[in-house]
Image (cartoon, rainbow, N blue to C red):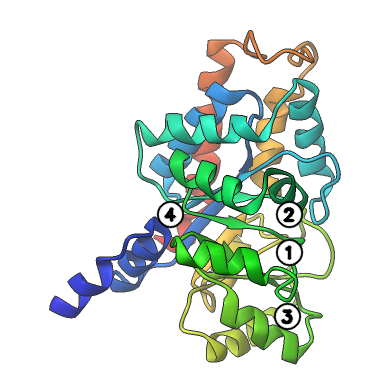
Amino acid sequence: MLSVVKELFVSNRIDARFAELRAASRKAFIPYVSAGDPDLDATVDIVLALEEAGASLVELGVPYSDPLADGPVIQDAFSRVLARGFRVADTWEIVRRIRLRSQVPLLTMVSYSLVYRCGAERFLDDAIAAGVDGAVIPDLGVEEGRDFLDRAAARDFATVLLVAPTTDPVRERAIVERSTGFLYCISVVGITGERTTLPPELRGHVERLKKLTTRPVCVGFGVSTPEHVRTVASVADGVIVGSAIVKLISAYAAAPGKVSPPQKSPAPFSPSDRAKLLADLSRFVRDLTAPLR
């Protein structure tokens, strides 16, 4: 019992959450949403609703005009948000509002171009001050990113690195060694988006990665159904779902007359629409995560 308590006493919320899950023999559910979609206030409510519905951690995608790994659903969400004048600083405002009501672990998924533009120290200062626990930076190479990874590690800020099915074994080991928080295993070759099936090679890939690290290995890209969740959870430590959730939100955010660029206010949808969105989202997530309970 003492060893479990000691393991749980860690400063980063991501590490603490995975320690809790491990102690309870449970798997993590990690939903992804686009920050600012449909608006700042709604994003706060969405994250809180996701936590209530069973999210272990939440990824906040920082809108960017030239996303690298995101499919059309997430790209469309970014376009809507950017049209209303969204800035990186708005992400920190969303996180600050969440932190007034919740301690759910939060990661940003952000292009390194935005980090570079801010400067590594300022990005880390702003993210940590707001209450962010880590970042997924899909276009940050492990070799080129040594300076940022060192700075983040010194401040206990998780840097979650991605491993693809096509990653060279030698480079894979380097990524595994530097990833903190957890390791993000990409299930398929290509961009994010819903898939009808997951590749049969996924199990072997995850099993190989788990032999290389004691950190949690979580799977994303293409996971969109309860059966997918069941399949991933049978071998991985966590399940990441993005496009399926963003698509549900988009049904409200992109409805005719709902978007009014370039302003951030008034809210692009009514309180009744927001309540229905949160109810539909909670129901979808509870159904999606049924295999984890």
Q: Position of residue 81 (x, y in %)?
A: 73, 28
- In space, the residues marked 1 and 2 are separated at their CA atoms by 6 Å
Position of the C terminus by quadrant: bottom left
Report the mark closest to the observer, 3 or 4: 4
**Side of 38 where 152 appears, left or right:** left
**Image disc number at residue 229:** none
Q: Which residue is mark 1?
A: 140
Q: Position of residue 122 (x, y in %)?
A: 58, 45
Sequence-wise, which precedes: disc 2 or disc 4?
A: 4
Q: On screen, 267 above or below 82?
A: above
- The three-letter code of the residue at mark 3 reads Pro
Q: Are marks 3 and 1 in contact (CB under 8 Å)?
A: no
Q: Are marks 2 and 4 in contact (CB under 8 Å)?
A: no
Q: Nearer the viewer, residue 131 or 147?
A: 147
Report the mark closest to the observer, 2 or 4: 2
Q: Which element carries disc 3, helix, strand or loop? A: loop
- In space, the residues marked 3 and 4 are separated at their CA atoms by 26 Å
- In space, the residues marked 2 and 4 are separated at their CA atoms by 25 Å
Sequence-wise, which precedes: disc 4 or disc 1?
A: 4
Residue 287 can be seen, yes or no: yes
Sequence-wise, which precedes: disc 3 or disc 1?
A: 1
Sequence-wise, which precedes: disc 3 or disc 4?
A: 4
Q: Which residue is mark 2?
A: 112
Sort mark 3 into few (<14), some (14-19) or many (20+) by Cα contacts within 10 Å.
Answer: few
Position of the N terminus by quadrant: bottom left
**Image disc number at residue 56:** 4
Q: Which residue is mark 3?
A: 200
Q: Are marks 3 and 4 in contact (CB under 8 Å)?
A: no
